[in-house]
Every structure is written in C-alpha cells, then in structure tokens.
Image: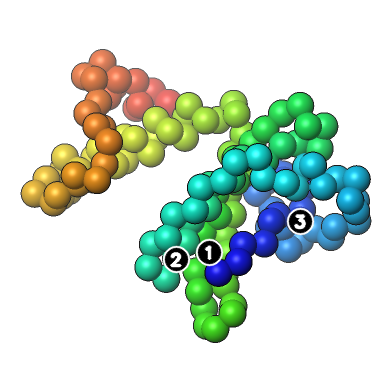
C-alpha cells in the first residue's frame, strides 16, 4: 500500500489536500516532506501520524490521516492538521475520552494494549473547564 504525501498547504479550517494544486514546484518540497512518520494498520483502515515542516522549515505540525480501502487500488482519505499550540488540548481530550470508555462504558474489556490512562483526581475536573 502506498501513501501519497500531502500536496496542499494546511489551513486552520483543515481543507483537504485535493482542494489545492501543487503550483509551488520543487522549491516547496521541504514543506511537504515528512520529518517523521508512524503507520498504524487497522483492518481495512490505515492511520498515519506524520510530522511535517512548514514552508519556512522553522516550525512543525502533525497530520493525522485515515486511509480506508474502497476497492482495489482506491483509498478514501481523511486528514486532520494538528498545530503545536493545540497538542496539549488534543492529547488531554483523547486521554479523557479513552479513560471514560475504559472506566464507564467497557470496564470488563481487556485494554491491556493501552498505556496507563489513569487520570489524577485533580485533572478530571480540569478537563471540564476546557470546554
């Protein structure tokens, strides 16, 4: 399975890379190149966590892509752009939601593949203040 790097400039609105043309050419290759990448196969879906640099090369952001096989050789992709100022909020919210499912919804399910997600008592209330 191949993964095509993002061809468009990320926007805060999370516009799809298909909405942008690649008019910048090779001068902007550094912007599109992945600095670091993790691929997570999950059945018919594959998730990609990619660190990319901005056009200036002085800042970085994360793209999270879900790629779902539609049929032979065709994939549907959904992409999120995550900027450094939002890393903490994103991780805290994900942590909280997984903790809720683990403790409240599926307490008897074996989540042994998860890292420790126990929330300190003082942090549980802090999550509610963020919304």
As rendered, which of 66 and 2 lies closer to the eye? 2
Name the quarter where the C terminus is drawn: top left
Q: Position of residue 4 (x, y in %)?
A: 67, 62
Q: Which mark is residue 36?
A: none
Name the quarter where the N terminus is drawn: bottom right
Report whether 29 appears left or right of 73. Answer: right
Q: Position of residue 120 (x, y in %)?
A: 24, 20
Closer to the chain start, of discs 3 and 2, is: 3
Quick one: SS at disc 3?
loop
Report whether 107 appears left or right of 122. Answer: left
As rendered, which of 131 and 65 lies closer to the eye? 65
Is there CB contact under 8 Å for labels 3 and 2?
Answer: no
Residue 72 position by quadrant: bottom right
Q: In whole angstroms, how far apart are the C-alphas of marks 3 and 2?
A: 21 Å
Is there CB contact under 8 Å for labels 1 and 3?
Answer: no
Residue at 84 percent of width and 60 percent of height = 21
Q: Which residue is mark 2?
A: 45
Q: Is residue 123 above or below residue 96?
A: above
Q: Which mark is residue 67?
A: 1
Q: Which residue is mark 3?
A: 7
Residue 101 position by quadrant: top left
Q: How many marks?
A: 3
Quick one: SS at disc 2?
strand
Q: In whole angstroms, how far apart are the C-alphas of marks 1 and 3?
A: 16 Å
């Amino acid at each position: 399975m191949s993964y095509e790097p993002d061809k468009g400039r990320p926007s805060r609105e999370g516009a799809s890379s298909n909405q942008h043309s690649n008019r910048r050419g090779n001068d902007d290759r550094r912007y599109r190149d992945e600095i670091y990448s993790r691929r997570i196969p999950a059945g018919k879906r594959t998730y990609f966590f990619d660190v990319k640099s901005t056009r200036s090369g002085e800042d970085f952001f994360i793209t999270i892509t879900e790629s779902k096989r539609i049929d032979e050789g065709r994939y549907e992709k959904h992409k999120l752009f995550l900027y450094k100022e939002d890393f903490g909020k994103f991780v805290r919210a994900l942590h909280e939601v997984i903790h809720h499912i683990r403790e409240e919804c599926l307490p008897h399910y074996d989540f042994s593949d998860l890292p420790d997600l126990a929330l300190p008592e003082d942090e549980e209330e802090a999550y509610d203040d963020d919304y």
